């Protein structure tokens, strides 16, 4: 027995050293952020950010290396980046992928295909559309002690705790592939040297067709999902009121007794008043009731506006088609698109303000 | 009074090698759950869409009937498949059938090994040195199979105990998804659903090994209940797993994903670790190991029973065969052909069991009449 | 090589050369401590004994004095005159030889040529019973076994005042003739197990049994396994408690460690403390210990696997910490790990060989100085240093020393597996050890019980320890003929509120 073990050891060592080429984690060029811009003549220009972590005393100093290449396909972007870098490229930790608005308006089809196939990629990755060059966002965003990917992930994640509907690559892909549902992405822009997330880019299949502004973003979110954060400033009488959402409930209902189905969106919003400015009245029950009915009409009009925008553009980020399909037997998929634009969709809002005037 | 049917040498097993009847649960469930479950959802969606879980359920229910038949066959012949085949078809044809069965199980084993290595190559190590890796795997498998049936039963038990926690990972996709996609239930025709059942059968293969290890069960009558629990357990795991995956993906999307289950592991993250697919795939080795070991044991055991030769020698040969084939089959298309082929043969095996059951019953009746 | 072994086997060590009593005495006389002198009298008789084994003053007081003054003509009369119990009269050479060698005094008389008297005068020189050092516990009994079989059995006996307590002695070892006692409780221990143990002890064919660990290795069902298959303990209380469970204890003369069999792998991770503390505390501590073992075995392999192959698994926030600590290290993770693990093993070995005080110093010097220096020099990363130190610490939490060694060793196959195929490699090694444990047996009983065979009933004292009032039954592992631990009639009935 011991004789066998004897020749096993050198055998093992040979295998260990000669089996798979191995690098430690620090020997990899770990791409954390990638951005795609339109290049010359149908080429795409890819920019990647690779952080360099510096050892020793000052751990906070992180340098970043940016590489920009032009290539005809996404895979060859990776290939070309490899040609310009001394270390093996690893895309397993890619956190954020940005698309130039122009590319998004044209078509993101080929990107989606690659993103949904590559097993190395994370499904929790964030995708975003940028106004202007992604290159300038990636290269301009580096702050002391923070990589661009830290910044962008932080920005998107924080806003998802606020008024931005939850998004990541999986959400994007699943609504892209789903029937009767269209996807959306964060829309980033550079203001001075700050990256700002204030808008939503709406997609029709793989093409970006519209954006929603800051105000509509909140309405869109309460129409889309139940959540319990986010603040919004609203005009009331002569001043402004800051409303904090402490839990909303949205329900879709469909009535298909007629040939043309009609949708009702029931929206219950529970909120607290955070701040009141410029209003002379003392805050009492009566004023609150007034506020509630005022906001109800406000949200109703806003929501109707947003929904009619969707219908006009023929996009369905709320997933009404998916909802309708799930409630209908013998659903005919090819008829839906034509139907959607003309469907009556009514929104019923009820706002209840739970707390006010508490001083601490 | 019917004369006790003759049983050939080796059909009876000494008591110290037998296992308690409750382990049949683990043997059945562990052998059924293998690589099939990782791609089950995609396969079933291609024919049945999001009604696929109904197909899975139906397959499970049908298998209960097949299991019932198997127990009848085994109880009537008081032995294993070799005794049954000999009784019904005579020594030579029966022997050939038993050998074919043995070969089928070897192919089933090969299929599991090959599919698992493909997963490793796609997800973890694209440049895996196949020959060395397979050599280590086979050495490990040999070590276990040489330990005998009791050790393999232990592996089955451990695989269920360790494999179950992996299923908790299914909780994460249900959080991220939407139940809307599943509704409305039953939009497909009965024919489509049954077609779906047919393709899911591949994931349920492995139950038929009961025909081989039946003599190893201490109290076969009491084990019946546990065998049915085992099949039911597998069915439930598959249904729940399919539902979780259906919630997470949209229907069109799932067609694009080769291994939906592994893809859902990706989204699991904790502050200290993320990307659970690596852990999942590594842990999946615990799930496929008893598959391969039991398969190899069953296949070689049949050869031993038919030819009355030393099982160790057959095992060595089977290991070498397995090694060479696993090393040689490494392209996606070859693997697909192999699993389609295995699935088809499995289908025939499950058709063959009812035939054997009926013939067995007729023979028994006939015997009874003669003796009366 | 096997031929050579065969030759060795066939040869009998130390041929029985002494044919007669005279030959024996002649051989003995060559040693300086063998004393023979004539007592005079009619007919003259001689007394002989080994000075270093017998109590000289005892012989003087109780043997020589009564013989000197009396006129005795036969051995029979002498036997009556000597006021010592258990005198034997025999003419069998083998018995004479055996008794002399353990300190009996021999009296020959010219009147009776063949017969001799054997007077027990053995001196039980032994270390005092001390406190348990390896298996120290804060609460509970402090006594530990010593090197004397006599004393050790006394320690067991006084805790078990029970006529059914059986002690069976065997002599093992061609040269050392070591006394080995098999202890069990009649009616509680399974007779089959007792038979197996006695048979295996009898089958041992070796010249020396120096310590109980020899027996452990020779009794093991699989001697090539890194896992000890007999539990050793230096605590009499633990030995007694296992006896009551229906297990068998083997005590070897000259060894302060008793062996317990059959045992299971989880028993190696249970400490006596677990039974002295309330059950919930004990359960938590036991779980912590099991976690520590897993951590100790798996932490460095996981480090190698993740840093070499699966860096996608490191979360973004942790990435900076790990990468920046590794950025100056010239070696791949595997070399880094092997260097540090070997350094720790070195320290441990050095600490074990040196006297306590120096050992401690070495530990501190090695741990702090070498560790910091290695990090400063950029040879290892501080993340790894923390992991290795913690895993070394975790491996010390095992209550049984033997299994601690095993854990030290099996870490290395895991590291190799991790370097070969990352997490898949670790899983492969893990399956190997799991299968190995499933295969293992301890004196014919499954070693991996209660996991396989799955015995729900035995799980109540395996990974967790449930309160005593739930543990009605003895472990199924021992297959005890008397299963019930309590008089079920007297067990309190459940009460309703306010009764």
Image (tube, coloured by chain):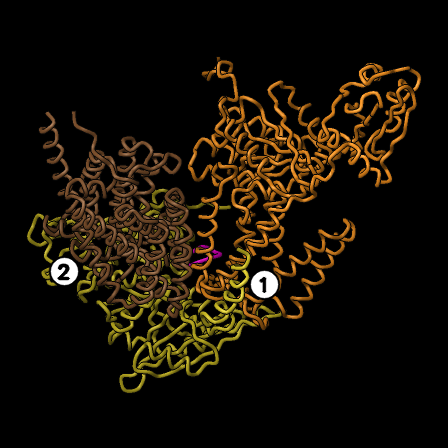
Chain colours: A yellow, B brown, C orange
Disc 1, SS: helix
Percent of width and height locating residue A323: 19, 53
Q: Which residue is mark 1?
A: C338
Residue at 15%, 39% in the rendered image: B357
Residue B147 left/right relative to C275 = left
Q: Position of residue B145 (x, y in %)?
A: 38, 49
Q: Is residue B274 magenta?
A: yes
Q: Nearer the viewer, mark 1 or mark 2?
A: 1
Q: Residue furthest bottom?
A: A41
Residue nearest the observer in this picture, A101 or B163: B163
Residue at position x 91%, y 24% in the image: C39
Residue at x 45% of width, y 70% of height: A20
Quadrant position of residue C85: top right
10 Å crowding of disc 1: few (<14), some (14-19), many (20+): some
What chain does mark 2 sit on?
A: A
- Side of A116 relative to C463 (left or right): left
State which quarter of the image contains the N terminus of chain B. top left
The quarter of the picture where residue C378 lies is: bottom right
**Depth order, front residue of B264/A201:** B264
Q: Do discs 1 and 2 share a chain?
A: no
In the displayed structure, B160 sits above or below A17; it is above
Crowding at dot 2, Cα within 10 Å, few <14 / some 14-19 / many 20+, comes out as many
Q: Is residue B303 left or right of residue C392?
A: left
Inter-mark Cα distance, 1 to 2: 66 Å
Q: Does residue A171 show up magenta in the picture?
A: no
- In the displayed structure, would residue C320 be above or below residue B112? below
| Residue underneath mark 2 | A340
Q: Main secondary structure of the magenta part?
A: loop
Q: Going by the image, does C154 lie left or right of B343? A: right
Residue depicted at 30% across the width and 79% down the height: A73
For the record, the magenta segment spans: B268-275
Q: Do callouts 1 and 2 mark residues in contact (Cβ within 8 Å)?
A: no
């Amino acid at each position: 027995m011991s004789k066998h073990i004897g020749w096993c050891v050198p055998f093992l060592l040979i295998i260990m050293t000669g089996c798979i080429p191995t690098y430690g984690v620090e020997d990899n060029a770990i791409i954390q952020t990638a951005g795609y811009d339109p290049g010359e003549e149908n080429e795409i220009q890819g920019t990647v950010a690779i952080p360099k972590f510096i050892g020793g005393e000052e751990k906070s100093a992180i340098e970043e290396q940016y590489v920009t290449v032009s290539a005809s396909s996404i895979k060859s972007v990776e290939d070309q980046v490899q040609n310009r870098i001394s270390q093996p490229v690893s895309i397993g930790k890619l956190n954020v992928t940005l698309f130039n608005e122009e590319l998004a308006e044209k078509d993101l089809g080929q990107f989606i295909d690659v993103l949904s196939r590559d097993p190395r990629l994370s499904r929790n990755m964030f995708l975003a559309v940028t106004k202007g060059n992604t290159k300038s966002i990636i290269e301009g965003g580096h702050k002391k002690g923070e990589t661009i990917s830290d910044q962008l992930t932080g920005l998107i994640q924080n806003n998802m705790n606020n008024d931005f509907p939850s998004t990541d690559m999986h959400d994007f892909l699943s609504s892209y592939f789903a029937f009767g549902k269209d996807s959306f992405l964060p829309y980033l822009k550079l203001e001075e040297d700050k990256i700002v997330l204030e808008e939503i880019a709406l997609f029709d299949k793989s093409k970006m067709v519209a954006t929603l502004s800051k105000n509509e973003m909140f309405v869109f979110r309460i129409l889309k999902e139940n959540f319990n954060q986010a603040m919004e400033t609203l005009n009331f009488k002569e001043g402004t009121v800051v409303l904090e959402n402490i839990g909303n409930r949205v329900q879709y209902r469909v009535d298909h007794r007629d040939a043309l189905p009609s949708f009702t969106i029931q929206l219950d919003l529970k909120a607290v008043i955070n701040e009141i400015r410029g209003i002379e009245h003392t805050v009492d029950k009566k004023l609150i009731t007034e506020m509630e009915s005022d906001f109800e009409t406000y949200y109703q009009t806003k929501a109707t506006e947003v929904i009619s925008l969707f219908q006009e553009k023929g996009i369905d980020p709320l997933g009404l088609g998916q909802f309708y399909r799930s409630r209908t037997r013998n659903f005919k998929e090819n008829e839906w698109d034509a139907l959607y634009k003309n469907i009556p969709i009514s929104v019923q809002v009820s706002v209840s303000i739970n707390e006010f005037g508490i001083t601490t | 009074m019917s004369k006790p049917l003759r049983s050939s040498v080796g059909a009876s097993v000494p008591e110290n090698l037998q296992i308690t009847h409750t382990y049949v649960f683990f043997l059945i469930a562990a052998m059924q759950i293998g690589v099939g479950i990782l791609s089950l959802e995609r396969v079933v969606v291609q024919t049945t869409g999001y009604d696929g879980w109904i197909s899975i359920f139906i397959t499970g229910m049908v298998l209960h009937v097949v299991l019932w038949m198997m127990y009848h066959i085994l109880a009537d012949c008081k032995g294993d498949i070799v005794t049954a085949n000999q009784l019904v078809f005579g020594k030579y044809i029966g022997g050939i059938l038993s050998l074919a069965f043995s070969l089928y199980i070897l192919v089933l084993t090969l299929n599991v090994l090959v599919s698992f290595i493909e997963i490793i190559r796609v997800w973890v190590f694209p440049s895996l040195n196949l020959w060395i890796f397979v050599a280590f795997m086979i050495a490990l498998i040999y070590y276990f199979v040489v330990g005998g049936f009791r050790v393999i039963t232990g592996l089955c038990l451990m695989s269920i105990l360790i494999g179950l926690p992996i299923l908790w990972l299914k909780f994460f996709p249900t959080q991220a998804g939407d139940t809307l996609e599943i509704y409305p239930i039953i939009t497909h025709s009965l024919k489509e659903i049954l077609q779906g059942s047919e393709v899911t059968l591949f994931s349920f293969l492995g139950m038929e090994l009961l025909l081989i290890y039946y003599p190893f069960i201490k109290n076969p009558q009491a084990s019946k209940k546990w065998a049915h629990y085992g099949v039911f357990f597998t069915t439930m795991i598959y249904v729940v797993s399919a539902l979780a995956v259906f919630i997470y993906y949209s229907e069109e999307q799932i067609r694009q994903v080769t291994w939906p289950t592994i893809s859902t592991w990706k989204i699991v993250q904790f502050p200290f670790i993320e990307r659970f697919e690596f852990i999942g795939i590594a842990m999946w080795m615990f799930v496929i190991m008893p598959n391969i070991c039991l398969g190899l044991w069953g296949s070689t055991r049949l050869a031993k029973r038919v030819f009355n030769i030393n099982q160790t020698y057959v095992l060595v040969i089977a290991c070498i065969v397995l090694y060479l084939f696993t090393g040689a089959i490494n392209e996606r298309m070859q693997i697909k052909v192999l699993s389609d082929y295995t699935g088809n043969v499995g289908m025939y095996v499950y058709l063959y069991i009812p035939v054997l059951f009926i013939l067995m019953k007729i023979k028994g009746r006939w015997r009874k009449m003669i003796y009366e | 090589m096997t031929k050579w072994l065969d030759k060795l086997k066939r040869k009998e060590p130390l041929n029985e050369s002494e044919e007669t009593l005279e030959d024996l005495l002649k051989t003995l006389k060559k040693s300086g401590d063998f004393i023979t002198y004539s007592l005079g009298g009619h007919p003259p008789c001689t007394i002989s004994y080994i000075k270093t084994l017998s109590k000289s003053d005892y012989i003087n007081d109780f043997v020589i004095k009564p013989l000197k003054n009396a006129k005795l003509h036969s051995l029979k009369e002498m036997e009556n005159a000597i006021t010592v119990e258990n005198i034997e009269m025999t003419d069998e050479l083998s018995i004479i030889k055996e008794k002399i060698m353990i300190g009996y005094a021999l009296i020959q008389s010219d009147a009776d040529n063949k017969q001799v008297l054997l007077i027990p005068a053995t001196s039980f020189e032994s270390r005092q019973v001390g406190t348990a050092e390896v298996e120290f516990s804060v609460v509970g009994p402090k006594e530990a076994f010593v090197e004397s079989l006599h004393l050790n059995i006394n320690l067991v006996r006084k805790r078990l005042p029970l006529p059914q307590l059986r002690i069976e002695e065997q002599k093992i070892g061609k040269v050392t003739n070591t006394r080995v006692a098999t202890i069990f409780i009649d009616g509680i221990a399974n007779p089959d197990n007792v038979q197996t143990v006695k048979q295996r002890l009898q089958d041992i064919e070796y010249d020396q049994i120096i310590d109980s660990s020899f027996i452990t290795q020779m009794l093991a069902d699989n001697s090539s396994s890194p896992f000890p298959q007999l539990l050793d303990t230096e605590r009499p209380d633990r030995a007694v408690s296992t006896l009551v469970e229906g297990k068998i204890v083997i005590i070897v003369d000259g060894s302060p460690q008793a062996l317990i069999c059959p045992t299971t792998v989880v028993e190696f991770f249970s400490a006596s403390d677990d039974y002295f503390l309330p059950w919930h505390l004990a359960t938590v501590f036991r779980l912590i210990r099991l976690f520590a073992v897993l951590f100790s075995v798996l932490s460095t392999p996981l480090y190698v696997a993740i840093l070499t192959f699966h860096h996608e698994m490191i979360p973004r926030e942790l990435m900076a910490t790990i990468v920046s600590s590794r950025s100056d290290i010239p070696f791949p993770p595997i070399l880094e790990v092997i260097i540090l693990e070997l350094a720790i093993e070195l320290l441990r070995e050095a600490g074990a060989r040196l006297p306590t005080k120096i050992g401690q110093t070495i530990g501190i010097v090695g741990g702090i100085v070498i560790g910091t220096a290695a990090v400063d020099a950029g040879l290892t990363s501080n993340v790894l240093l923390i992991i290795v130190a913690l895993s070394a610490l975790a491996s010390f939490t095992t209550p049984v020393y033997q299994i601690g060694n095993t854990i030290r060793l099996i870490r290395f196959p895991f590291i190799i597996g991790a370097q070969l195929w990352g997490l898949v490699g670790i899983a492969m090694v893990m399956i190997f050890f799991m299968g190995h444990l499933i295969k293992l047996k301890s004196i014919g009983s499954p070693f991996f019980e209660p996991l396989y065979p799955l015995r729900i009933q035995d799980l109540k004292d395996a990974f967790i320890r449930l309160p005593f009032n739930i543990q009605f039954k003895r472990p199924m592992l021992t297959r005890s003929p008397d299963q019930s631990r309590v008089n079920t009639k007297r067990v309190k009935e459940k009460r309703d509120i306010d009764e």
